[in-house]
Amino acid sequence: MTNTTHKPQAKIRKVNFKFEKPFPKHWFNNNPIATHFMNAQHLVFPDGEKFFIRSVKAFAEVYKNDPELKKRVDNFIGQEGTHFAEHQKFWDIMIDQDLKPMGFVDFYRNSAWNGLESWFRNKLVKNRLGDKLALSITVALEHYTAMLAESGILNKEMTEKMPKEMQDLFMWHAAEEIEHKSIPFDVLKKVDDNYPLRISGMLLASIGLWYYLTKGTIYLTQQDEDVNRKDIPKYAFDFLNNFRKNFGGTLSKQYYQYFKRDFHPDQIDNYHLAVELLKNKNYA
Ligand SMILES: [Fe+2]
Ligand SMILES: [Fe+2]
């Protein structure tokens, strides 16, 4: 069943989040592991979102003659462009906190994008399989961001543990992720509606996303001289327990929905969460 009752049009909003220095080092619930998991997202999202944009743009010839889809894709690209710029601002704050984010970013860029992505785009050229795989990974990661967004919006007591500006950044991003969740999916459907292709993208996306978020969390924790090493197991347990409590239900249910042959993101009725949040926060 497809539910499009509340489907909003994705649109580009002007935002400008400002983070004051010094920013609290363990800004999420006073838990360094939870904080560095969120910090890892500040590091992983920007280059990931640039990948989403080039993956969709690679098939511009497929959507350029469909004015409705072209308009949606333009708004998707505009939204992702704004997201990466806003998250990237926090890199400077991390440097101010004596963390070295660029060490991780360089590793991530070289392995994921200059390494793996360019390998499969250049090697899998028959029927543009490499480009299609990149788009399929993008679609899968958009499913992930929409799942994380839904849980983040619904579990208000979790985001209330963040400083206001950070809470606003993540909630604005979450709302726009839900708003545009079906756009790359509709492009992939038009490019190649092949089930194994879509599922391969999800398998690769799952490995990549959790690998880099875990690696980034560990990297930043190792660098953080304000963490008492003997407290790490306690912080890690608290973080994992809260993560399971707040995200586990949505992630496990909606992850498997993606594997249905007739899956479409509109089948998950959460557009109203984005609409209400953007209205309550007075985003035009
Ligand atoms: Fe985004
Ligand atoms: Fe997105």
Image (cartoon, rainbow, N blue to C red):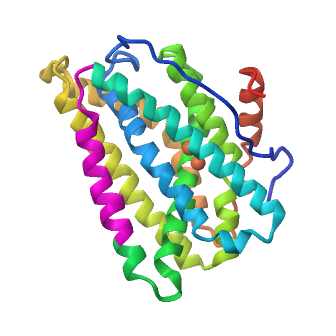
Q: Position of residue 250 (x, y in %)?
A: 57, 44
User: Camera-side residue: 13 or 25?
Assistant: 13
Which corner quadrant of the image does residue 189 belong to? bottom right
User: Camera-side residue: 160 or 122?
Assistant: 122
Q: Is residue 53 visible?
A: yes
Q: Is residue 22 magenta-colored?
A: no
- Magenta segment, prevailing SS (helix, strand or loop): helix
3 vs 179, left or right, is right
**Looking at the image, residue 57 lies above or below residue 47:** below
Q: Is residue 98 magenta-colored?
A: yes
Q: Which residues are magenta?
A: 97-118
User: Camera-side residue: 50 or 112?
Assistant: 50
Q: Position of residue 43 (x, y in %)?
A: 38, 39
**Looking at the image, residue 254 lies above or below residue 123:** above
Q: Position of residue 194 (x, y in %)?
A: 60, 79
Residue under the point 42% across and 58% down: 206
Q: Is residue 147 visible?
A: no
Q: Position of residue 41 (x, y in %)?
A: 41, 38
Point out the image quarter for the N terminus: bottom right
What residue occupies the far bottom of the structure in this picture?
A: 126
Residue under the point 83% across and 60% down: 68
Residue under the point 44% across and 12% down: 20
